[in-house]
Amino acid sequence: MANKTSFHLLLLLTMKLDHPRAHRSACLKITLILLLVWFVVSCCGGIFFRDWLDANMPSIGSAPFGFWIAQQGSIISFVLILIVYAVLMNRLDNKHGYTEEN
Amino acid sequence: MTQGLLNGIFIGLTFAIYITIAIRSRAGSTKEYYTAGGGVSPIANGMATAADWMSAATFISMAGTVAISGYDASRFLMGWTGGFVLLTVLMVPYLRKFNKATVPDFVGDRYYSRVARGVAVICAIFICMTYIMGQMRGVGVVFSQLFGIGVPAGVLTGAAIVFFYAGLGGMKGITYTQVAQYCVMAFAYTIPAIFIAMAMTGNVIPQLGLIGNYTVGGESVPFLQKLNNINTELGFQEYTSGKMSTINMFCITAALMCGTAGLPHVIVRFFTVKNVKSVRKSACWTLGFIAVIYLTAPTIGAFSRVNLIEKLHNTSYAEAPDWFKAFENTGQMAWVDKNGDGAIQYFGAGKSDMGTNSVFQGKGPTYPAYDAPENQRIGSQGQRLLANKADDSNPNELYFGNDIMVMANPYMAGLPMWVIALLMAGCIAAALSTAAGLLLVLSTSISHDLMKKIVNPKLTDKEEVKYARMASFAALVVAAYFGINPPSAFIAKTVAFAFGLAASSFFPTLLMGIFSKRVNREGGIAGMFCGIAFTSGYIVYFQFLGGTTDQLLFGITPEGIGFVGMLINFAVAFSVSAFTSPPPKHVQEMVENIHIPTGAGEAETHDFEI
């Protein structure tokens, strides 16, 4: 019996110790994925591969694809990235019990 | 009603609003002075940060830069918005959790060193000072144009107003004032764009007009194609393709992005909201509000370029519109009749064997003294003559500054007078909001980080705020002096410097401080020194000591070298840290702790009435 209690205690303790770490690694994952999207859109789409995109992708209205990404699309996607980040991080915080009222 | 009177009414009205807000929300305690008490709502903080971020230069010159360089200007559009993604996901939530008033505070505590704190303070002061000079100049120019009072009087008026609400109101005062200023700026920027989009493309939304059809005079061709045709016909680079090398374009964009994420006056804005959750929300709003302006800038640039060329190219001077003559008088546009046909011609480098298109020799237009004989001042067509020698290596006759596109836009499109008055008010709002935000960071850097943390730790909070006010007064005096006597070429060059410095010092140092437990004092300081030394050495060599283009490292211009400086900072910091002992236990715990998103509001220890 005593053994079982101490096992539970140990489990509780490791969970307590682990959960900032679990939160941190999940947070890092979200951050890295979003930064990858950010890099692909702005640097790859708007700069490195823009000539290829201009030539091979459908134009947006009358604007070549790469040009549109560089001057408009990238900015729109930056805003979207931040919205996704806020939503995902809030969900993650709630899951790990880091809830604060607004 | 005259234009001047209407301008006066609009600006008077907006000023009354700003001052009322500033008085109602002035700071009552140190915490309110530094971080507005930490309880600003995310939307309000978003607007205030957006207003703070968009300076007079952004407001006035960015569309002009896009108009002139087309695709190449995307580096500014992406760099100055993309930086907010880095800022939000890598920096501000953690720094907010750390819960101190300034950025050097974090550097000093994380690297447990007064040297690190000192370097951070110097960088913060330098970055803010660079910016604020340009803002004061902007305020002065707009005021002098409006009231005909001369630039020095304009600068002093602007300085007095900024001191009034930044010095007295602290962060709380300026935050709520900036909310009002953002609203003025957003309307002032988008309304002319909407009018012009309707006139040129029949589309109410400028962003759709840009990718839509040009519909003036019965023809209907894709707008960008029309612009490309005009550009190539006149000997310019095609609008939608660039002439910058890919690597240079990337480095500049990256340096601007990382620099943005490392600017102390932007970071501290996020210390004003309640908790980490609000920081993320506020960052979304901030970028959303900034995007309103940044998505409109390329449309204004493109529309006004077509307008300008259609209105002026091959028009005889006698028939040139009145606004052209008005801007000629202020020295923002100029015409040199090289071929003597009495008509204005505008050509790009493609029309010249030498590959040039400068109108005259020398950097900016200079004019004969007002008491010079009339035939030296006024040309055969009645145009204003320049003192500069004409540059005869090319046929281009039309000179205009970058800032002309936004300012002349409503005139070119024949918009109603109130739109022009609104634009003037927007311009002043842009300059004042940025100047106030910078002034606050400057004064807290000096009073909090320098006086209290380095010089005299026994300072009471009351004395600290007194020093902050004295510092903001001193900073304004210096800024006003340079606003009146601008080292003009110097300012333009130092902006690249400010971003390069932020990218090579603050950004990597903060990033490693937040995400690594291993980077220690020695590594942090060595990294900062190497990053800064490399970046500033490179910039000084090429901007001031006459380095030539073939000496550039991989063809990277000084604007983009901050990115390389950043890589050097990372490399040096990690390698030095690897060979020295890890940071002490309490610092490692601190790093652990800033990753836990709750509890940001609790640790605050002191908050005194002032």
Image (cartoon, rainbow, N blue to C red):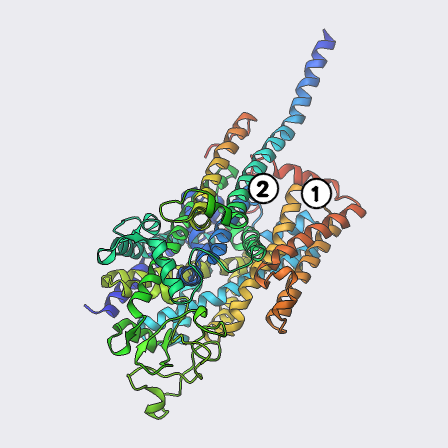
Of B73 and B366, which appears nearest the observer? B73
Pointer 1: what residue? B587
In the figure, B286 relative to B596: above or below?
A: below
Q: Which residue type carries mark 1?
A: Val
In the picture, measured across the screen, residue A92 lies left or right of residue B540, that is left
* Cα–Cα gap, marks 2 and 1: 14 Å
Q: Position of residue B533 (x, y in %)?
A: 68, 62
Snapshot quadrant of residue A98: top right
Q: Position of residue B574 (x, y in %)?
A: 73, 47
Q: Which residue type carries mark 2?
A: Tyr
Count residues near mark 2 (Cα–Cα under 10 Å), then give few for <14, some for 14-19, many for 20+.
Answer: many
Of B529 and B15, which appears nearest the observer? B529
Of B409 and A70, which appears nearest the observer? A70
Q: Earlier in the sequence, mark 2 or mark 1?
A: 2
Chain at numbered mark 1: B
Q: Which mark is residue B94?
A: 2
In the picture, measured across the screen, residue A50 lies left or right of residue B321, that is right
Snapshot quadrant of residue B174: bottom left
